[in-house]
Image: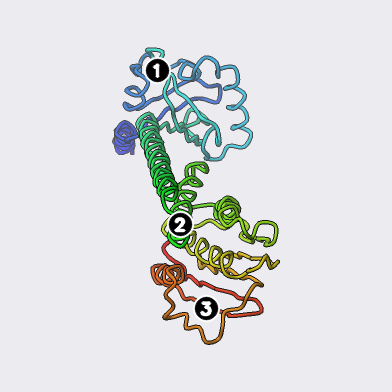
């Protein structure tokens, strides 16, 4: 019976050496009794240099004082588990260099008494990959931030050029058309500004966008200042940019239209913008006002208004539907189905 046992011991010893993770066996007193080849390579020692030595020699000096206490704690509840869960662990090589590790500890019974088997994984390559990924993501964020900043600046330049053009025009109708174009450009510019300031390049904080856009629209149509109030309800609604820009332009068109035509002769009233987002990603956008109603005989499908044409076009772009209530109050509701989540 002794020969087969010797063969089995030799086989297990060979398997121990060939396992592709570093393994160290220590006594309950923390003395190293066995290491495999990968442990030797990982820490830079030969087996002879490690055997009989305290396991603390493989631990950075600043952590050594606490290590015996952790070992005693393990012995009181000796079950297989990761060492130092939730903490960053480090190993110490013979040359004095440190490296990140992940350690699993297991109680084992041997002919020489109870031991502790430590399985050690060198995380150096994983940590380097994580740093490279983190650096790449940061570079991407900086690039996107710069893109949004430049787009915003370029749109503001176009806005200013239209300002200069209006100074040379006496036709009030043409000036009004250019002002409408300015407002559309400003709406797109503000969305890029919101993304730039929030550092969240996937979704636009639409409440923040509306808080900046709507007061600027009021300033643009100064004849209604002090007579028309604007209320916004869009708490915590965030939209991907491919939805935010069309929605922003729709809000711009419908609010501008209400300010221009809904409150003639300093008529008092209010405009309400409500944006709701469902758990499935669907969006309901409603712009209503209690101003002048839309006449029943006005064909909204064939109206020559560029603003309403844009609203219908943008709604189709969003694959949504547009509903119109002509009075009590006048309300335009755009329903957008859920899209792909970023």
Residue mark closest to the camera, 1 vs 3? 3
Question: Is residue 285 something one can see in this rendering?
Answer: yes
Left or right of 45, for residue 275: right
Q: Position of residue 212 (x, y in %)?
A: 57, 50
| Neighbour tally class for label 1: few under 14, some 14-19, many 20 plus, Cα within 10 Å | some
Comparing 60 with 186, the one in front is 186
Q: Name the residue carrying label 3.
A: 323
Q: Position of residue 51 (x, y in %)?
A: 41, 18
Q: Label 1, label 2: how many angstroms apart (C-alpha)?
A: 76 Å
| Neighbour tally class for label 3: few under 14, some 14-19, many 20 plus, Cα within 10 Å | few
Q: Residue furthest bottom?
A: 297
Residue in the image at 43% along x and 51% along y: 166
Residue in the image at 33% along x and 27% along y: 38
Residue in the image at 50% along x and 31% along y: 116
Q: Name the residue carrying label 1.
A: 93
In the depicted structure, whether residue 213 falls above or below residue 303: above
Comparing 116 with 73, the one in front is 73
Comparing 9 with 261, the one in front is 261
Q: Name the residue carrying label 2.
A: 175
């Amino acid at each position: 019976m002794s020969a087969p046992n010797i063969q089995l011991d030799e086989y297990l010893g060979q398997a121990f050496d060939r396992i592709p993770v570093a393994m160290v066996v220590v006594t309950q007193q923390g003395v190293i009794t066995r290491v495999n080849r990968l442990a030797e390579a990982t820490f830079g020692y030969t087996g002879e240099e490690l055997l009989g030595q305290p396991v603390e020699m493989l631990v950075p000096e600043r952590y050594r004082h606490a290590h015996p206490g952790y070992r005693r704690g393990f012995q009181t509840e000796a079950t297989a588990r990761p060492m130092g869960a939730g903490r960053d662990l480090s190993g110490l090589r013979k040359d004095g260099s440190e490296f990140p590790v992940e350690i699993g500890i297991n109680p084992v019974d041997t002919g020489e008494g109870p031991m502790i088997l430590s399985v050690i994984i060198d995380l150096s390559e994983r940590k380097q990959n994580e740093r490279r990924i983190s650096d790449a993501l940061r570079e991407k964020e900086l690039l996107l931030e710069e893109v949004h900043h430049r787009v915003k600046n370029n749109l503001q330049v176009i806005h200013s050029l239209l300002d200069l053009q209006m100074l040379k025009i006496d036709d009030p109708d043409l000036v009004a058309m250019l002002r409408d174009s300015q407002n559309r450009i400003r709406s797109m510019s503000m969305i890029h500004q919101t993304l730039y300031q929030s550092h969240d390049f996937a979704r636009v904080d639409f409440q923040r966008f509306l808080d900046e856009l709507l007061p600027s629209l009021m300033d643009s149509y100064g004849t209604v200042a002090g007579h028309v109030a604007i209320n916004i309800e869009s708490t915590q609604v965030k939209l991907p940019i491919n939805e935010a820009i069309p929605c922003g332009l729709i809000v711009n068109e419908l609010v501008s239209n209400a300010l221009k035509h809904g409150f003639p002769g300093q008529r008092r009233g209010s405009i309400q913008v409500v944006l709701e987002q469902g758990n499935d990603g669907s969006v309901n956008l409603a712009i209503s006002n209690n101003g002048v109603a839309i006449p029943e005989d006005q064909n909204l499908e064939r109206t020559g208004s560029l603003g309403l044409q844009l609203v219908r076009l943008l709604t189709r772009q969003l694959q949504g539907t547009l509903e119109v209530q002509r009075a009590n109050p006048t309300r335009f509701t755009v329903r957008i189905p859920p899209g792909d989540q970023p």
